[in-house]
Image (cartoon, rainbow, N blue to C red):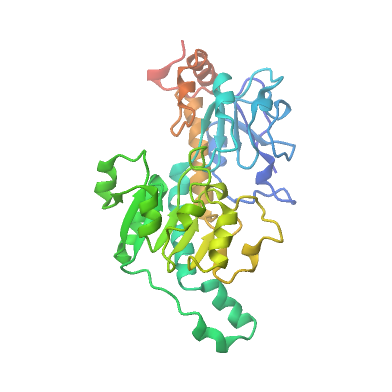
Amino acid sequence: MAGPQPAASRVTVGVSHDFLDGDGRNVWGDIRLSELDTAGIDWHYLPRDTDELLAADIDGLDAVLFAAPSVTARTFAGAGRPPLLLARFGVGYDAVDLDACTRHGVLVTITPDGARRPVATAALTLLLAVLHNAATKDRLVREGRWAERDRWMGRGLTGRRVGLLGLGNTARDLVGLLRPFETEIIAYDPYCPPRAAAELGVRLVDADTVMAGSDAVIVMCVLTEETFHLVDARRLSLMKRSAVLLNVARGPIVDETALISALRDGRIRGAGLDVFENEPPDPGNPLLRMDNVVLSPHSLAWTDEMSAGNGGSAVRAVLDVATGRPPRFVVNRDVLDHPDLSARLSELAARAGLFTDAELPT
């Protein structure tokens, strides 16, 4: 199933093939693509299912809305004219070569406004599941081990100290969700203004203090060279034996081998993981057999709320460039100084016929 097929004189948008299931239906449901139809913008699903976007996939398109495929320097090799916009459905962009995109004058956007509440809710869900031993108690019932229930006493959240590694938009939303539990919240985020943290009632500290002083540590930062293995063996050794670790960000932020060792030796109480260093995890990964771990296949936040939110945000990015203005949530900010950007925005607006009176193309 696809939208109207592209015409050479109109704005054309490609939607990556990974959105489709085997029957040609969008696995995410309604991601607001009808708003492109309403605006007179042509769109279609890319015909090829690929792990990496290449020139053959993007040539002739003005924008691409994509989820799983990576974007590398090879994406632009041999491309006649790359799209003006690559709109990622989601908040992570570690699989996107931002420097290559900037060199080619390509705007890269993400959808933090759409993912913020669903991911924050997923973090709270995972936290409560780990503290209450929900996965293990489910197995006790299914496996006829009812008599073992007194061995799996849970741990309450009310009044505990929660430590956040990262205090971006999603983590700030989680702070609000935690308020009814009367938790004390500390956070490590070298880029968060102290005033913003103070307004939330969050105390900014260093990473070691988060690890050592929290009853639950939740990883919510972006994966970068700086945050790779931020949670390593040394930092895990700082945690209380009664504490738990949650990761709803990116797997490589946590040294998985060190985490397995800490869990196996009882140096921490438990863990909740929606992400892994290698996805999917190897069938022999010890985490898959541990009772003190709750696991999810990098999809705990996937709900109809996220579909509509991420889709709406990505579609708005397309509509922004079709009206001749840079979109919100551009992650490669240097591209805004690209010498061709203004002319390309004006050209796109002229073809779309959606520009405002204040932004008429010259």
> As displayed, is residue 69 above or below residue 353?
below
**Which residue is rendered at x = 53% and y = 56% of the image?**
303
Quarter of image, res 218: bottom left
Asked whether 360 or 260 is in front, the reply is 260
> As displayed, is residue 82 above or below residue 209?
above
Q: How far across and how far down the image is residue 159, in percent?
A: 30, 68
Quarter of image, res 174: bottom left
In the picture provided, is 171 more to the left or to the right than 115?
A: left
Q: Residue furthest bottom?
A: 147
Quarter of image, res 241: bottom left
Asked whether 81 or 190 is in front, the reply is 190
**Which residue is rendered at x = 51% and y = 54% of the image?**
233
Q: Quadrant of the N terminus?
A: top right
Asked whether 72 or 246 is in front, the reply is 246
**Which residue is rendered at x = 47% and y = 60% of the image?**
245
- Number of dots carrying numbers: 0
Q: How far across and how far down the image is residue 153, in percent?
A: 46, 80
Residue 105 visible in this rendered orientation of the protein: no
Q: How far across and how far down the image is residue 87, in percent?
A: 55, 34
> As displayed, is residue 193 above or below residue 302?
above
Residue 35 visible in this rendered orientation of the protein: yes
In the picture provided, is 44 more to the left or to the right than 227?
A: right
Q: How far across and how far down the image is residue 58, in percent?
A: 67, 28
